[in-house]
Image: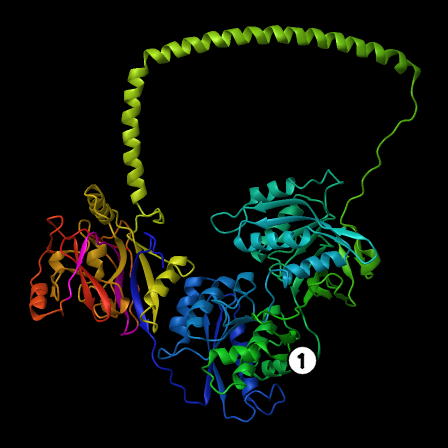
């Protein structure tokens, strides 16, 4: 594995203990954004109670002949990778034992982090709401599945294209926000939309994008008002031959409604057909006073099922809410609810079909082969864990009889053009009103082009005057051309004279300029070398410790390196040490090697500090790893570094449970995380300048062993008559490097 100079860490290690299953309970962990969705806890435990009841007629095939009880824990994972990772480690693991399966998380970023960590323990995971296309696959996400479809051609993007084509539209405009989700969705849409297809009857369909713009976000992660107006003013409303009245708003919900509000207040094209995705469609507007009487907002949401399975669950939910004196829901108020239910049921069914409930591969195999009628419709999975044959509901924002805004289910669509099923409700468009006949009354996506104004009468006077005017224009043009040529020749002569004078001046000062250039060149070379020596991923901060987040590739590269010979450990925290003083001293030694024609032989190595708090090394401004703190070992008194993490694990620092913050690391106070478990340890991944080394086998003979123990400096190389830079050897199955001077290692 290639290790770059910016991988720097202080590591806390959590050791996995043996599973302790009693055989009568199965633990399902639930990770979700409980702060924003306070109803999910009741739904989760209600579903578990239904499954545990083997006589109520609701999925009684699950653990039908076994005395098994499903138990669960719900932990808030928000939509943040760090929060989700912490929720998994400290919320779902009981006595260091992971749950049998996981439902969640809500957002794709959080699900991605949990899937990669839980996958190391082969824990099956089903998300009800994470739609990122990057989660599809059999590699690092092979234990991840979802009851929703991904945001690509096999999911919502494909359904968006199918819906637009089914409505007879082929020209759209696209507005996005400056977010990865929005941009990825738009790029995938363009890939599927900008194609040319010939139908069975010879008719040709070709997708067009008449306009596209990205709306910027401000420091508060909300849409910037000026950027909204600039984007809307750029729409070619005065060019009907290229404009489209259909605008795709591919944004998150909290960004979509401010854009719509700004469009309404500036009286932007009142007959615009705004088309949204599931982050917009089905969500209540923040305010409603600005919304037109006929908004014309339409779009997609995960399929709203209304068959017998749905009605049966709603009935059971109403009875449960009545018995517990809760608010009674007459229907599912959020599409996520149905997918949460089906996620729990699918995992329970898969677990009930295997003998060893800790065999994640067997559970995943059964899960991918499931087919059952769920609250969200027919539930089954593709070989990579995505929702098979997904459908999406087409919703239309309308005002009901009480003039209240309501998202109305008007149709459903699959991911293929023409796969649309119309409902009984009418669909309303801004500017044209509501229609019931989707096939013939849907408005065009194009604006009418006004006829060109043409005159067929030619007056007699034009026949006489036009030739005269033409002759006069030719004469004037010729005289203008002659004048311009003379002026150009004069300017050329003046330019040549000026260039000669300039060259004469440059020749007079050439020697001085050459000397100045040499000095400037030397300065630039020194500055360039200084900048190149600084790790390129250091962030612009005064902090000495900068946390490496789970979203960063370095985090997973470090975990892979750590687990090469310790497969039962996990990372709790990773920090980058940005100590410029230590880095400068380390770079000095590297340059010294180069000036002596000694290969640096730089390596990434492990180091445990035993009883010395890593704070001392991180906070030092001169040496970092210091000989005065070293102890005598098999190769004398020196600084020991290991190739294998398992060796340094024996010397790793054990942090106290009650932690105190770092002092003096920077202008701001920084904190290391509290050690919540007794088996947490901290150690360094460091850079080491090995230089020339000599391998000394201390087990070669008793004399050799005694010689090694007496070392205070490396032996002399007889070929160069210079001392070796480093001594190496073998201990506890790992190669060891020992240096006997400060500054040769940097705590990454």
Extreme residue toward the front, this view: 719
Quick check: is 145 in the magenta stretch? no
Image quarter in which the C terminus is found: bottom left
Image quarter in which the N terminus is found: bottom left
Q: Would you say residue 706 is visible in this rendering?
A: yes
Is residue 49 placed above or below 724 in the rendered structure? below
Quick check: is 680 in the magenta stretch? yes
Nearer to me, 628 or 4:
4
Direction from residue 517 to residue 158 in the image, left or right: right
List x then y, in percent, for residue 93. 39, 76
List x then y, in percent, for residue 689. 23, 52
Q: Secondary structure at mark 1?
A: helix
Nearer to me, 736 or 128:
736
What residue did someone put label 1 on? 309
Direction from residue 739 to residue 298 in the image, left or right: right
Q: Residue at x 51, y 85 (%)?
A: 354
Q: Residue at x 78, y 44 (%)?
A: 447
Q: Residue at x 36, y 65 (%)?
A: 559
Direction from residue 352 to residue 475 in the image, left or right: right
Nearer to me, 383 or 555:
383
Q: Residues within 10 Å of mark 1 (few under 14, many from 20)?
A: some
Nearer to me, 81 or 554:
554
Q: Would you say residue 655 is visible in this rendering?
A: no
Q: How many marks?
A: 1
Which color mode does the image show?
Answer: rainbow
List x then y, in percent, for residue 738. 17, 59
In the image, the segment drawn in magenta is: 677-697
Q: Residue at x 55, y 56 (%)?
A: 181
Residue 483: quarter of image:
top right
List x then y, in percent, for residue 663. 23, 56
């Amino acid at each position: 594995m290639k290790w770059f100079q910016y991988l720097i860490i202080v590591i806390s290690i959590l050791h996995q203990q043996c599973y302790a299953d009693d055989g009568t309970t199965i633990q399902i962990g639930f990770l979700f954004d409980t702060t924003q969705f306070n109803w999910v806890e009741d739904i989760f435990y209600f579903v578990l109670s239904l499954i545990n009841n083997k006589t109520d007629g609701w999925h009684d095939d699950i653990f039908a002949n076994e005395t098994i009880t499903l138990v669960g824990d719900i932990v808030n994972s928000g939509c943040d990778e760090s929060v989700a990772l912490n929720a998994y480690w400290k919320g779902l693991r009981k006595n260091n034992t992971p749950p049998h399966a996981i439902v969640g998380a809500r957002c794709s970023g959080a699900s991605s982090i949990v899937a990669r960590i839980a996958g190391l323990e082969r824990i099956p995971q089903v998300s009800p709401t994470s739609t990122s296309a990057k989660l599809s696959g059999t590699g690092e996400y092979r234990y991840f599945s979802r009851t929703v479809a991904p945001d690509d051609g096999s999911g919502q993007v494909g359904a968006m294209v199918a819906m637009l084509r089914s409505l007879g539209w082929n020209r759209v405009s696209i507005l996005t926000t400056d977010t990865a989700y929005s941009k990825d969705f738009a790029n995938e849409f363009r890939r599927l939309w900008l194609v040319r297809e010939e139908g069975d009857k010879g008719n040709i369909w070709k997708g067009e994008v008449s306009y596209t713009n990205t709306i910027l976000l401000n420091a508060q992660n909300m849409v910037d008002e000026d950027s909204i107006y600039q984007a809307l003013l750029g729409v070619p409303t005065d060019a009907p031959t290229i404009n489209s009245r259909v605008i795709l708003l591919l944004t998150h919900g909290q960004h979509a409604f401010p854009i719509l509000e700004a469009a309404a207040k500036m009286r932007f094209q009142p007959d615009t057909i705004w088309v949204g995705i599931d982050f917009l469609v089905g969500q209540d507007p923040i305010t409603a006073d600005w919304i037109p009487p006929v908004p014309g907002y339409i779009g997609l949401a995960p399929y709203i099922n209304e068959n017998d399975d749905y009605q049966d669950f709603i009935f059971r939910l109403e009875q449960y809410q009545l018995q517990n004196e809760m608010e009674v829901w007459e229907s599912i108020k959020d599409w996520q609810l149905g997918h949460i239910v089906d996620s729990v049921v699918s995992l329970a069914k898969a677990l009930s079909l295997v003998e060893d409930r800790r065999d994640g591969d067997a559970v995943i195999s059964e899960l991918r082969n499931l087919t059952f009628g769920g609250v969200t419709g027919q539930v089954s999975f593709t070989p990579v864990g995505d929702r098979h044959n997904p459908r999406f509901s087409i919703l239309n924002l309308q005002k009901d009889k009480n003039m209240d805004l309501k998202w109305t289910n008007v149709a459903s669509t699959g991911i293929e053009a023409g796969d649309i099923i119309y409902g009984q409700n009418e669909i309303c468009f801004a500017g044209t009103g509501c229609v019931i006949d989707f096939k013939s009354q849907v408005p065009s996506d194009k604006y009418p082009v006004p006829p060109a104004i043409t005159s067929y009468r030619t007056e007699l006077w034009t026949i006489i005057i036009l030739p005269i005017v033409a002759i006069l224009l030719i004469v004037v043009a010729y005289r203008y051309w002659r004048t311009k040529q003379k002026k150009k020749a004069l300017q050329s002569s003046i330019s040549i004279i000026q260039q000669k004078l300039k060259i004469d001046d440059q020749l007079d000062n050439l020697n001085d300029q050459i000397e100045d250039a040499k000095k400037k060149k030397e300065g630039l070379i020194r500055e360039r070398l200084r900048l190149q020596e600084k790790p390129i991923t250091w962030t612009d901060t005064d902090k000495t410790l900068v946390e490496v987040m789970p979203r960063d590739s370095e985090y997973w590269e470090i975990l892979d390196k750590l687990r090469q010979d310790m497969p039962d450990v996990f990372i709790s925290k990773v920090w980058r040490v940005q100590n410029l003083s230590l880095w400068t001293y380390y770079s000095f030694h590297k340059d010294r090697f180069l000036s002596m024609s000694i290969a640096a032989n730089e390596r990434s190595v492990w180091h445990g500090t035993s009883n010395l708090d890593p704070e001392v090394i991180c906070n030092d401004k001169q040496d970092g790893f210091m000989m005065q703190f070293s102890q005598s070992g098999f190769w004398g008194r020196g600084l020991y570094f290991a190739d294998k993490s398992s060796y340094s694990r024996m010397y790793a620092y054990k942090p106290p449970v009650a932690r105190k913050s770092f002092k003096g690391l920077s202008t701001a106070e920084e904190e290391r995380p509290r050690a919540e478990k007794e088996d947490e340890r901290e150690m360094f991944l460091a850079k080491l300048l090995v230089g020339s080394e000599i391998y000394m086998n201390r087990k070669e003979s008793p004399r050799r062993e005694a010689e090694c123990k007496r070392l205070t400096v490396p032996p002399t190389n007889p070929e160069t008559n210079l001392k070796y830079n480093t001594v190496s050897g073998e201990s506890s199955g790992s190669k060891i490097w020992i240096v006997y001077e400060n500054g040769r290692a940097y705590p990454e």
